[in-house]
Image (tube, helix red, strand yellow):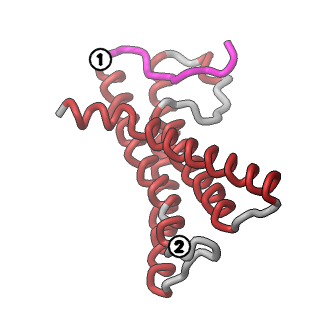
Amino acid sequence: MDFLRRIDRNAELWLLLVFYVMLVITMAIEVLRREVFAYSSIWGEEIVRYSFIYLAWIGAAAAVKERAHIRIDVLMHYLGPRPKALMYMFGDLVMFFVAIVALYWSFETVLVSAHFGSVSHGLRISMVWFLTAVPLGFALIVWRLLQSFMRDLRDLKNGTPVYQGDTLFD
């Protein structure tokens, strides 16, 4: 159980690290190849592009987990603990329904790609691997929203202040 708890706590961070390292190393190799050998490859560009896409979607889930996504919270400073918790829960609920719809439609895209067998131009790998970034990101977002909703319900029930996440400017 401790292993699953550690995965739940750090899954996005480790995935972000893997894709970021892959992006940086591939980009460095491609710059070196281009500048020193006057040669570049199409596969390097694709790895960087698709790593960035995975970074964006996994990062979105990490932001939802930490409540670090962009929001305008001027009104939240004037609300008491209970209305503030209800506002956060309402926002999470709206985002949850949007994420469910987006998860469905993004998964539909992956299925269409799998059905027609499309492959990437440079790597010649099934596009399913790259298109999966979007439904994976939305699935993680849905999971983190469910966790956030449960945390907020627990805080509301216990009378403790709702988790607000980190603020950019204090």
Which x, y percent locates residue 169? 69, 17
Question: In the picture shown, does residue 153 fall above or below 93?
Answer: above
Check disc 1 and report its element: helix, strand or loop. Answer: helix
Disc 2 crowd, CA 10 A, few/some/many (<14, 14-19, 20+): some
Residue projecting furthest to the left? 1
Instruction: Classify residue 71 as left or right of residue 165.
Output: right
Residue placed at 50% from the left, 87% from the top?
Answer: 116
Q: In the picture, which quadrant includes the C terminus?
A: top right
Q: Which residue is mark 2?
A: 127
Which x, y percent locates residue 73? 64, 26
Residue placed at 44% from the left, 77% from the top?
Answer: 111
Magenta residues span: 158-170
Q: Amino acid at mark 1?
A: Asn
Question: In the picture shown, does residue 113 fall above or below 39?
Answer: below
Disc 1 crowd, CA 10 A, few/some/many (<14, 14-19, 20+): few
Which x, y percent locates residue 141? 46, 47
